Amino acid sequence: MDTQPFIRIENVTKTFGEEVAVNNLSLDIGKNELFSLLGASGCGKTTLLRMIAGFEKPTSGRIIIDGVDLTNIPPFERPVNTVFQSYALFPHMTVEQNVAFGLKQEKTPKSEIEDRVASMLKMVELEGMRKRKPHQMSGGQRQRVALARALIKLPKVLLLDEPLAALDKKLRERTQFELVNIQELTGITFIMVTHDQEEAMTMSSRIGVMNAGMLQQVGTPSQIYEYPHSRYVADFIGEANIFEGILQKEDESNAYIECRELGQDFSIKRHDFAENNAPVAVMIRPEKMRITLEEEISDELNSVAGTVKDIAYLGDMSIYHVELESGRVLQASQLNFQHTAERKITWGDEVLLYWHPDNAVVLAQ
């Protein structure tokens, strides 16, 4: 990513009457990034996308792309194209007519249109379908037509509004990688809006998690998942075991937390994050929490006893729901290296859950 931001959103607010859709939001996006805006419905991500596109005007703040303030520039004069969730293809036009539409509107020479359409259809692997109409194509193929139509004008920024929402799971997964490859081939900056965590984690160079019109955290997929800044992000991205506790003390390597939910103290890596007796929230991902029938665990590890109440079998992985004496239920996940009949842990078993102090993350309250 370049040191200078390619897209700069400065203190942007958007209100609809008394409702604040986007609240004093600032964000920098680098050239050639595939950046995702991730959040639940109503968090403001689509409103922000529409302001970048020019379909909505900010109530206050500025939107700058490649050094140019575009806040008051109409959509058709911006170096931006949008792929909509519905694809918005012209049903009476063939694939090549849909893809060529923008170039024809700009009165591009016919020979240049033909060359660019052929090149774009090759990129999205639709060369053999140029004469088909949208109703003769699958959802994934229509999605690629919409993408080709948006890319053919060589925008500086491509906006994607829930672009894969209409596809089934397998096709969506395959198309995710196709989109990433196309973005790398073209070098165009992509900004994608999605509520699908897996989609954002798989495709993005960076993610901005939104809630109530504000950015909760911006970072790479691994930063967002492994080191969430807040309870909201920890809870929203993947599964999380979150404990409330009181910081008791710190030594040279660890901090110690008193936790009523676990019925015992546990240790985490030293952080110098709070004074003694301060309340803290701590997160441990289920895959970092191991499960065993053994009765003793190394003193370097944290452990707590419980009873297996439920097992979710997901093919490659099993998720164990373990109830502690306090009544709190924790989740531990484990890869399925063995066949179901060979696995030892089952419903009703008394087990130990254990985790390393390094795997606990302190969250902002």
Image (spheres, grey):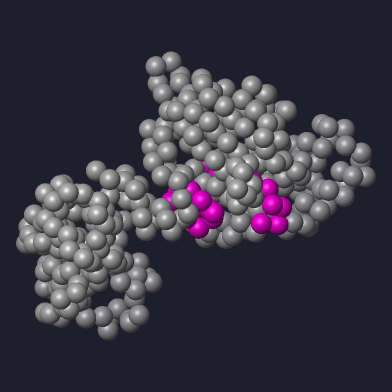
Q: Residue furthest front?
A: 252
User: How many circles with numbers are drawn on the protein?
Assistant: 0
Query: Taking the image as drawn, is residue 337 in sight?
Result: yes
Residue 149 locus on image (x, y percent): 73, 43
Picture residue at 51% right of the left edge, 51% below the top = 206
Who is closer to the viewer here, 324 or 344?
A: 324
Picture residue at 58% right of the left edge, 50% below the top = 34
Q: Which contiguous range is marked in magenta?
A: 184-207
Q: Left of 154 or right of it: where is 191?
A: left
Depicted 270 relative to depicted 12: above or below: below
Picture residue at 26% right of the left edge, 57% below the top = 271
Residue 198 position by quadrant: bottom left
As for residue 329 lying within the magenta part, the answer is: no
Picture residue at 87% right of the left edge, 50% below the top = 115
As for residue 200 lying within the magenta part, the answer is: yes
Q: Residue furthest top?
A: 17
Residue 332 locus on image (x, y percent): 25, 66
Depicted 333 relative to depicted 222: above or below: below
Who is closer to the viewer here, 272 or 16?
A: 272
Residue 173 locus on image (x, y percent): 53, 59
Who is closer to the viewer here, 186 or 1?
A: 1
Depicted 110 relative to depicted 183: above or below: above
